[in-house]
Each structure stands twice: as structure tokens, then as C-alpha cells.
Image (cartoon, helix red, strand yellow):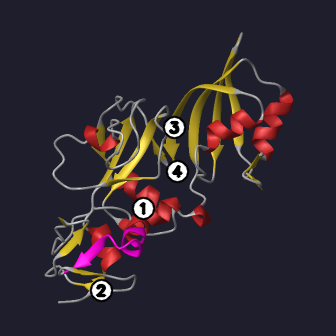
Amino acid sequence: MEKVRIQKLLSDAGYCSRRKAEALIAGGHVKRNGRPVSLGDKATCADLITVDGERIDIPRKKQNIYLMMNKPRGYVTTMSDEMNRRCVTDLLEGLDARVYPIGRLDRDSEGLLLFTNDGNFANNIMHPSRHITKTYRVTVRPSISDEQLVALSEGVELDGKMTLPATVIVKSKEPNRVVLLITIKEGRNRQIRRMCEAVGLEVARLRRISIGPIKLGMLKPGTFRELTAEELRALRTAIGKKG
């Protein structure tokens, strides 16, 4: 029976992303057959793997799952929350397999969120070098000037580093209310909100409507579905992988 790095086993089991698994291992939370493990340690599906005492079922043959959800406001993008806030995983009713979200949307944001139990796939989408585009429909107040549009498009400074150039389109403009379509190629923490705040705009509503070639479409808030084979192929092409 082939031995595999434990972070990959945890990722393949749908417990968490590989990056998160590495952090859990480094923090001493993971044991193999009752003994703490280190980064680089390997195991098989026959070994007893636990995280903070919880046994993790390692499937002998994993079936990869790829989902999309229309996240509503008021939910945090975590597997569980110490403050007992509502989590996006609470909305995965009826799903037997364990999956985790790819990337995040903050509590007050809504829209397209992807889930999987395929660690490599998740890492490829989130990796900065892939430059997977994400488009947001953003309602801002009170109005927007040409200077603010140029600043958002060319990049603003966040945490001492300029954001990459973005595509910004004015979708509609009313008194004290402007709807923008903003497309970015990176995924810093709360990036769209912080970009808008940096140029003096208040975000009233933020909804992600696409990730790469995947579009939210008419999926109802709080519901999810599997990605189609065509959507999955298009996403793999976007990240430079075939099949």
C-alpha cells in the first residue's frame, strides 16, 4: 500500500486544503496511530489519522467533488466558527461527502463560491501565479469620479503593495448610488472592499458573479450544485491543466 504525505491524505479526504493541513501538522494537531507527525511524514489509508483527537476517514479511492454555491450574506466562509456564526458549510444540506471552500467571501459579501475535496485543484485556483480572474458586482456610494475610476483600474496601495491593474466598468449610475463591475486577477483579503475604501467609496453591496469561466448565473441564494463537465474543463483550462 503506497504511502502518501499526510497533508495530502487530509486534503484528499476533504478535511481541509493542503495548505491548512500543513499548518495543522506544524501546530502539532495531527497524529498518526497516536503519535504526533511532522511535515513530510507519510501514511496510508490503513493508518489512524486524527486531528485534535478527531478520527479522519481516509478513503481508499477518493471521488473528487466540485460544487458551486450562491453564498448569501450573513455566512462566514469557514468549516466551523468559534463564535457560533453561521457557516457556508451549514448550507451543504444533503451532501454526504466532506468538501471545503476554495477561497473566501467575507460575511457581508455574497455570490459565487466554489467547493471541492480536491486539494491540487483548490491550490491551483488560489495560487497567485495563476491569475484566475474574479468579477464582482459592486454597489458603491455616494458617486464615483473619473479619478476614482482610474485609481481602481490602475491599482491602489494595500498593506504597502500596489494591487494589480483591474477592469472597472460603470454598470449604472444614479444619485448617491453607482453599480460597478470590477474584475481582478488576485485575491487579497477583502480586496474589493479595501480598494473601494482606499479611494473614498463606501461599499453598500458586493456580489461575486464569476470565477474564471464559471458564472453564477441564476443559482438561487443559499443553494448549490455540481459543476458541469464543461465548466470543469473550462476551469482546468484556465489554470493550465487538461482533462
Name which of mark 3 and mark 2 comes first in the sequence. Answer: 2
Q: Is residue 153 visible?
A: yes
Residue at 77% x, 47% y: name it. 155
Tags 1 and 2 touching, CB below 8 Å: no
Q: Residue furthest right?
A: 147
Q: Does 205 sit above or below residue 127? A: above
User: Residue 222, position in %: x, y?
Assistant: 32, 32
Q: Nearer the viewer, mark 3 or mark 2?
A: 2
Label 1 amino acid? Ala
- Tell me: 70 left or right of 46: right
- Which stretch appears magenta? 22-32
Task: Indicate which label's residue lies in the foreground, 1 or 4.
Answer: 1
Instruction: Say what secondary structure mark 4 lies in.
Output: loop
The x and y percentages for residue 220 are 34, 29
How packed is label 4: few (under 14 Cα within 10 Å), some, or many (20 or more)? some
Q: Real-space Cα distance between discs 2 and 4? A: 34 Å
Q: Which residue is mark 4?
A: 212
- Does residue 25 show up magenta in the picture? yes
Between the C-alphas of marks 1 and 3, the distance is: 18 Å
Q: Dot 3 surroundings within 10 Å: few (below 14), some, or many (20 or more)?
A: many
Tell me how far mark 4 sits from mark 3, CA to CA.
11 Å
